[in-house]
Amino acid sequence: MRTRDFVQVDVFTATPYLGNPVAVVLDAVGLTDHEMARFARWTNLSETTFVLPPNHPDADYRLRIFTPGGELPFAGHPTLGSAHAWLGAGGTPSGPGTIVQECGIGLVRLRQTAGRLAFVAPPLRRSGPVSNQIRAQVARSLRLPDDAIRECEWVDNGVPWIGVVLADARTVLDLDPDLAAMGDLDVGVIGPYVVGPESDGHDADVEVRAFVPSLGIAEDPVTGSLNAGLARWLIPARVLPARYVVSQGTALGRDGRVHVEQIGAEIWIGGDTVTCITGEVLL
């Protein structure tokens, strides 16, 4: 064991402790899979990341992402938080204006605009409607009648998300899911805020919640991979506009904001990031 630089970053917020934290070990060279997994279980955060030299010639760094339950090929808030930590530690992108992260799903491009980081939403590995059996399980687990679910599709981009569209944000916030009934499904739910004369007066366009019992996470506070998958699905379907703001974490006392924007064929998922803890860890 030796001491290694360590940062804990709050993601999708400019105000500390209102977003989703990620633990970042900035020099993970020499750590085994077992040691990474053990440390991730110990931090007990939704994700802990480990920064390594890249294997791919086009990447600036390589990232391994662990939950308390195992490793993920990709996750959104760890991508933004780790890029923030890497830049803060003196990392310099090889290309102007673009950071390239190597992870389990391949290369992920990031940009920094006006101090806010964003990543390109990766392609979906699986899409399309879920089976009737899975839809019924989702409805049971959300304690909703089937006709309350407007759409239910796979939005798998490294995490096997099932996206669920509900009538409005209030319905999303009122959910009291049965996580045992959800089983090993990863379910993300989205509903719009009311606009026009009956406006909610909210600064976001939609409310999102993410339930991940398969990874030992009852509800994730603010979720980049889910929002990337939902955007890949719902922007082309014209359910959501090419630019919108997501509120997430409200039900957990957080105040996360995810900024989604389509530019050409690319969809960018962005958010503010703020360092909350710096120091060293013994690993």
Image: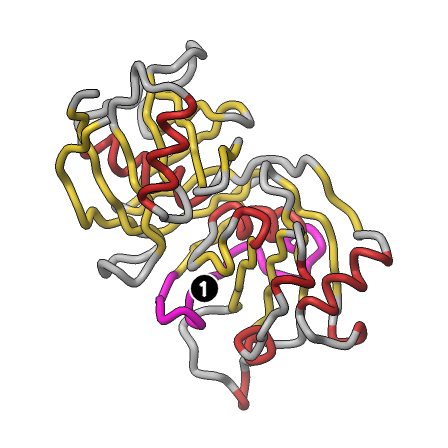
**Residue at image coords 21%, 20%:** 1
Up-down relation of residue 106 to residue 147 (above or below): above
Residue 146 at x, y = what percent? 80, 72
**Residue at image coords 46%, 56%:** 220
Which of the 4 image quarters holds residue 158? top right
Instruction: Tell me: 192 left or right of 277.
Output: right
The residue carrying mark 1 is 248
Instruction: Tell me: 29 left or right of 73.
Output: left
103 and 194: which is toward the camera? 103
View extreme (left): residue: 279
Instruction: Tell me: 259 left or right of 117.
Output: right
Numbered range of the magenta stretch: 234-256
Which of the 4 image quarters holds residue 111? top left
Up-down relation of residue 54 to residue 63 (above or below): above
Residue 181 at x, y = what percent? 69, 63
View extreme (right): residue: 132
238 and 270: which is toward the camera? 270
